[in-house]
Image: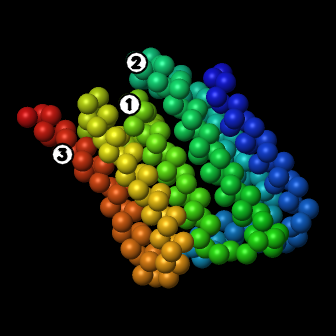
Amino acid sequence: MNKKFWLSIIIIIVQLTLALYLSSFIASDARIPSHWNIRGEIDGYTGKWTAILLFPGINAFLFIFMLILPIISVRYRETSERFSRMVPIITNIVIFFFAIIHIYTLLLGAELVSNTGSFLYYALGLMFILLGNVLPKMPSSFYIGIRTPWTLSSEYVWRKTHKIGGICFVISGLLMIFIPAILGNNATALTVMFVLFMSLVLYPVLYSFILYKKEEK
């Protein structure tokens, strides 16, 4: 196993340990937040032990999947060195994000913090910034990255699209952090953020199509 994966294991262990510790502060009939709407308002709840164990389970499943990715990926052998370097990094980022959100929901359930609505945007923004810095280095894969018919059909299109995609991800992350921080969670600010975010996320898909058509000619 790649030694970089050990960080994911440590994160999951710390996550589960903190979750079990916080369980002593949560009432047995407590309703733990499990979903937020676009305005950052809680609109879904789950039970205590489901909330405590679900996210560590998701992270454990994700870790196992990424660990066996070299076995199930048909393109791993073509760029095994890049895969071995980048997959653990992406795994660490996503697992860390899920762990942070998990602990936050338990703190809300224990009533140790209040829901401001902005925390999720800050966490998502940070994740997008980190992924944006990693994305351009990711080799072609059916499982990770901007997987369109055009990027998967051309190594050139994959590389160029992921360079643009990385920039778009970083800008999206910055928007998710600074718009709520400066303008708050009012409807206008969130609408502007959502429109800009979706535009930046969808642009690499359109870019890959245009680039593929140019390459065909």
Say if residue 47 shows up in the picture.
no
Q: Residue at x 39, y 74 (%)?
A: 192
Q: Return the disc, 1 or 2, that comes first in the chain's sequence.
A: 2
Q: In this picture, is 8 found above or below 123?
A: above
Say if residue 111 shows up in the picture.
yes
The quarter of the image holding the C terminus is: top left
Q: Residue at x 87, y 60 (%)?
A: 23
Q: Return the disc, 2 or 3, that comes first in the chain's sequence.
A: 2
For residue 78, the mark is 2
Q: In this picture, is 202 found above or below 68?
A: below
Q: Residue at x 34, y 40 (%)?
A: 163
Q: Give the crowd class for mark 1: few <14, some 14-19, many >=20 residues within 10 Å.
A: many
How did the renderer colour the structure? rainbow
Pointer 1: what residue?
Answer: 140
The quarter of the displayed image where residue 111 is located: bottom right
For residue 176, the mark is none
Q: Of all residues shown, which one is farthest toward the right?
A: 24
User: What kind of residue is marked 1?
Assistant: Ser
Q: Residue at x 62, y 39 (%)?
A: 92
Q: Of all residues shown, which one is farthest toward the front?
A: 182
- Please name whichever residue, 178 or 28, is drawn nearer the observer in this view of the structure: 178
Q: Is residue 133 left or right of residue 147?
A: right
Is there CB contact under 8 Å for labels 1 and 2?
yes
Which SS class for mark 2? Answer: helix
User: What kind of residue is marked 3?
Assistant: Ile
Is there CB contact under 8 Å for labels 2 and 3?
no
Whole-angstrom CA distance, mark 1 to mark 2, is 9 Å
Pointer 3: what residue?
Answer: 210
Q: Give the crowd class for mark 2: few <14, some 14-19, many >=20 residues within 10 Å.
A: few
Q: Is residue 143 left or right of residue 66?
A: left
